[in-house]
Image (cartoon, coloured by chain):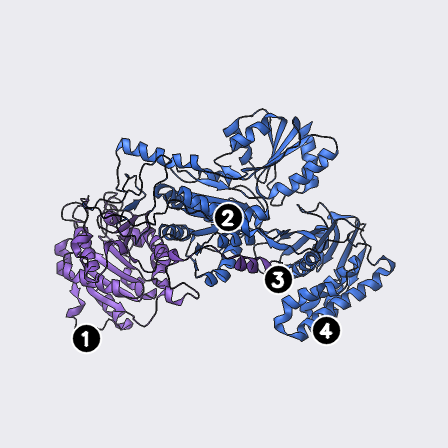
Chain colours: A blue, B purple
Amino acid sequence: MLHQLSWKVGGQQGEGIESTGEMFSMAMNRLGYFLYGYRHFSSRIKGGHTNNKITVRPTEVRSIADDLDILVAFDQETIDVNYQELTEKGVILADAKFEPVKPEDSKAPLFVVPFTEIAAELGTTLMKNMVAIGATAALLNLDDEVFQNVVNDIFGKKGEEVVQKNMEAIARGREMMSELLGERVGEWALAPADGKRRMFMIGNDAIALGALAAGTRFMAAYPITPASEIMEYLIRKLPKFGGAVIQTEDEIAAATMAIGSNYGGVRAFTASAGPGLSLMMEAIGLSGMTEQPLVVVDTQRGGPSTGLPTKQEQSDLMAMLYGTHGEIPKVVIAPSTLEEAFFDTIQAFNIAEELQLPVILMTDLQLSLGKQTAEPFDYSKIEIRRGKIVTEELAESADKAYFKRYENTADGISPRVLPGTLNGIHHVTGVEHDETGKPSEATGNRQTQMDKRFRKLEALRFDQPVYTNAPHEEADILLVGFNSTRGAIEEVQERLNAQGMKVNHAHIRLIHPFPSAEMAPLVAKAKKVIVVENNYTGQLANIMKMNIGGHDKIKMITKYNGTPFLPGELEIKVKELAH
Amino acid sequence: MATFKDFRNTVKPNWCPGCGDFSVQAAIQRAAANVGIEPNNLAVISGIGCSGRISGYINSYGFHGIHGRALPIAQGLKMANRDLHVIASGGDGDGFAIGMGHTIHAIRRNIDITYVVMDNQIYGLTKGQTSPRSAAGFITKSTPGGAIEPSLKPLEVALTSGATFVAQGFSTDIKELTALIEAGLNHKGFSFINVFSPCVTYNKVNTYDWFKEHLTKLADIEGYDHTDRNLAMQTIMQHDSLVTGIIYQDTATTSYQEKVVGYSELPLMDIDIKMSEQEFTALVDEFM
């Protein structure tokens, strides 16, 4: 009985590799297993190696597995590129069609199954992925019925015959593989799962659902990897809630349209990745200066320029914090789990409206596109707070004086009147302005309005700005990260603590304004602080030093080759730095 | 009912004496009153440049944004509140240089707003550089040897971009201009109105007198039919775009908002945004 299974399917992009992984994952999810799926793909439609690695456990899984138990190959490249990940007990299942060759130094047995041929016999080679799933079922000793309701869901609308054919393909794959395995059938069986129903989704799904639950009714966005799924989800769902999505001509239009809509009183947002974020900078400054709420999602990917558009990186951090010219108050939130992604999206909308400023919700490719299991989100925890929107009738002013939209209040937050309101007329401008919104360059006014805008941050309330698991009063090491590195860090912390080291973990969720009050004590009680991040310059480490000092003990482990941290490699690097 | 005086506020414009923009402002105020808009139901969204200041000089909701981006802000606002009358305005640099991409796409998107461009063929606020509307050979600080690039033809661009309403006015002729803006406000879709609004300080070529000498009123052209797109294109090409009046109007094509599936009849800002538990559970179930 295995307590963790790591399974990977690979082939040429456009060959149905993704759907093979999807089918297998959905079936395992419905059995109650926990999953973490991560796709390797390229910026092209057809061709090029792609693979989908899925880690399955009967207990919570937080990270991509270090190694591999089963490799399903639809081409030779898949074997050549991935066989070294295989464990001692690992196996390769390969399609007979490409006459697979086992690399000389591979210890893993190679099982050649005629995936394509069997599928062709059943009517279409498209079903070769179903045959491969059947072969996997033999290794895991899974009944064909396990796949029945997933096949119904996916092919049901194409008719009973298609469902039957696909089930037959699974059965044929299982039978053929069982013959090849002989007594070894079921040797890779997983310990049973609890059978509980859980969600299985990517981070972008959690964000899109969060936006909908937060009451967004308008989104303006431009397609980009790895953010597009957010827009696509809302294009499907917003019509049911009366809202709309506009695919704009560029990201500048997306951000400014979202500002216009927020000005009109609608929770509107945009989502993009690094290149789009760069184009939005002036608009983000406009939101800050005119105090119009704005939510921007930045799904980080490999930069700079077009960089590594389909690969993991966390290098937009400084751009998000300091990218705009001039100075504005701004909030940057970095969720690290599906649940945080969902609730932080709702928080982002609340904060943007309450404090009337731009909020950037930051993710990275691994969190945005990695597919994980999560308990259903708790409806009762959804809270909508819209801040100081004036809803009562306003008195007419005799001298046509503007409404004081930028009134210098104690907390810096001024009452907000929406266009259309009787007697609420005021002016909004990105030029420095007085309390009524009229342009003003007077020195005293400038100072008052700058102070007022920044004072709003003092009213910021954020639950759990740092996720901490700090069991040690005196720690050898404090591991620090943000976004998707959380799983790998948790895994490493667990392993090192089991080995007798004293390791604490802090994952920063509210990046800006920096949670110094929470981080400083954690840093103080650690001998060494190791910041783990997917970038070259150690952006989070530098932000920590800037805010709370600790230059002598803050070290960093960076990775910028486009792939996520695996627990094994991170464990080795942490140990190296520990001594 | 509001009169044009209700659209006046107490702010004194910082335009040069004699600037064409004064008349454009007056025409907008008159047109808004004439079509029965109340000041609180009008929003003027402007760009950056001398003309961009216009949103602060009209007693209505006003948003003075960033250079070239008046149109996306205005479109976002109209999507949020379909009951609001939205006018976007700015100069030729704003709309045809830095914001040209938005102009073309706003035209083809056809959201029901009115776009008034104050076209003076020069950059005024930055003190006299060439504009995409400057004629070839035009001498400015940035083109001391004369502009090399030909002048951009906004009317032609609008017609080929699928415009449903294109008009051109001259700031001196407030009566005609007011009528054009009224027609634009009444048009169900995106209305694009280019206005020759001379810069008395930096453009010594395209002066009031120059326009008076060169402009032809479409009303004076026998047989002109502004519902005929081919004729519109032919006429503006024949007259080097120096015409005023409604150049083209298509009343058959419905606006973007009428075409969006599921888009609320009620302004989005007025919808109750809290989702029911039943709706939420159904969405969550799709992931299980």
Tell me, yes or no, whether the two marked residues, 2 and 1, touch with CB atoms within 8 Å: no
Q: What crowding class fits label 4: few (fewer than 14 Cα within 10 Å), some (14-19), or many (20 or more)?
A: some
Looking at the rendered image, the disc whose residue lies closer to the viewer, 3 or 4, is 4
Looking at the rendered image, the disc whose residue lies closer to the viewer, 1 or 4, is 4
Give the CA distance from mark 1 to mark 4.
70 Å
Q: Amino acid at mark 2?
A: Thr
- The residue identified by callout 4 is A122
Tell me, yes or no, whether the two marked residues, 1 and 3, touch with CB atoms within 8 Å: no
Looking at the rendered image, the disc whose residue lies closer to the viewer, 4 or 2, is 2
Asked if one can make out residue B197 in the rendered structure from this viewpoint, the answer is no
Image quadrant occupied by the C terminus of chain A: top right
- For mark 4, give the secondary structure: loop
Tell me, yes or no, whether the two marked residues, 4 and 2, touch with CB atoms within 8 Å: no
Q: Is residue A337 above or below residue B287?
A: above
Q: Is residue A457 left or right of residue B100?
A: right
Give the CA distance from mark 1 to mark 3.
58 Å
